[in-house]
Image (spheres, rainbow, N blue to C red):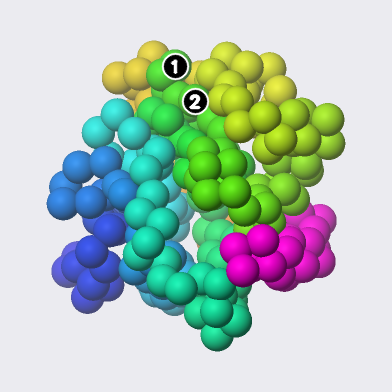
């Protein structure tokens, strides 16, 4: 099976696929742990659309590179976010990523291979979520930059972990370890660090063996409520985030 062109199209996304259709998407920068940039923000919704349209994909594994899922961001690369036109582009892209993760016609297995303190909501939107024992979760960029966490964190953490826990995490800027995340119901399994990806692949192959129509419709069934909350809450939340940036 030849590799599709999108496998090499995006500078911060690396792809590989097994013969049974398990696609792995790794966030990276230069082959190492990713620094999230404005380019990553722009590319991710496009990449998810490419994944959705490729019928050779049966399951998606989403993970990071090395010992980090995502814990670094280049704020300046996002551009002049205090300008309405720039922020509207970011707002549109941010909503698209979350909608497309939930609307992919295939299951998503999220593997937290280490710290996830930037865009942890991506992992929480996975259909199955595996964490290395070294994973930590939180929100570092918004408290650091002094802007409201309105880009989906507030909706997804509230939905998955509960309102009090979401408020505590996003107000304080504290982090939680993998064991706490499992206790909160955020993570399905915590495994030894070296086994995290292998366990994700094992589960992905189980899901890939199920009938395609079942996988697609089960995805819709289980994500309907969360997708509705994303559509209702993120545009407003990102408008407030843009206002604090201005």
Which residues are the magenta region? 221-246
Task: Work out whether residue 3 or residue 19 is closer to the camera in this orientation and state it.
Answer: 3
95 versus 24 height, above or below: below
> What is the secondary structure assignment of the residue under circle 2?
strand
- Left or right: 179 in relation to 170: left
Answer with the quarter of the image where residue 44 lies: bottom left
Answer with the quarter of the image where residue 169 lies: top right
Please tell me which residue is depicted at 29% across the width and 58% down the height of the picture: 13
Q: Which residue is mark 2?
A: 136
- Mark in front: 1 vs 2: 2
Give the Cα separation between the discs numbered 1 and 2.
Answer: 9 Å
From the top left corner, tell me how far across and down residue 138 is, in percent.
Answer: 56, 33
The crowding category of the residue bearing disc 1, from other C-alpha atoms within 10 Å (few below 14, some 14 to 19, many at least 20), is many
Please tell me which residue is depicted at 60% across the width and 63% down the height of the picture: 245
Please tell me which residue is depicted at 60% across the width and 26% down the height of the picture: 174
In the current view of this chain or complex, which residue is farthest to the front? 246
């Amino acid at each position: 099976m030849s590799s599709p062109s999108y496998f090499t199209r995006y500078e911060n996304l690396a792809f590989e696929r097994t013969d049974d259709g398990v696609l792995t998407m790794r966030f990276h920068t230069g082959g190492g742990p990713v620094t999230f940039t404005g380019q990553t923000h722009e590319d991710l919704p496009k990449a998810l659309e490419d994944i959705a349209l490729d019928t050779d994909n049966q399951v998606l594994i989403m993970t990071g590179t090395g010992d980090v899922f995502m814990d670094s961001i280049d704020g300046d690369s996002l551009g002049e976010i205090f300008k309405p036109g720039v922020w509207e582009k970011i707002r549109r892209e941010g909503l698209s990523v979350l909608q497309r993760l939930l609307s992919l016609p295939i299951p998503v297995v999220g593997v937290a291979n280490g710290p996830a303190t930037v865009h942890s909501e991506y992992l929480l939107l996975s259909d199955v979520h595996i964490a290395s024992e070294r994973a930590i979760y939180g929100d570092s960029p918004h408290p650091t930059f002094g802007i409201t966490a309105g880009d989906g964190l507030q909706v997804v953490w509230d939905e998955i972990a509960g309102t009090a826990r979401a408020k505590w995490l996003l107000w304080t800027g504290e982090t939680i370890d993998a064991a706490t995340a499992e206790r909160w119901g955020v993570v399905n399994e915590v495994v030894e660090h070296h086994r995290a990806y292998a366990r994700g692949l094992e589960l992905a192959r189980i899901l890939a063996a199920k009938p395609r129509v079942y996988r697609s419709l089960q995805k819709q069934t289980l994500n309907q409520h969360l997708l509705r909350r994303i559509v209702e809450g993120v545009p407003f939340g990102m408008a407030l985030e843009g206002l604090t940036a201005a």
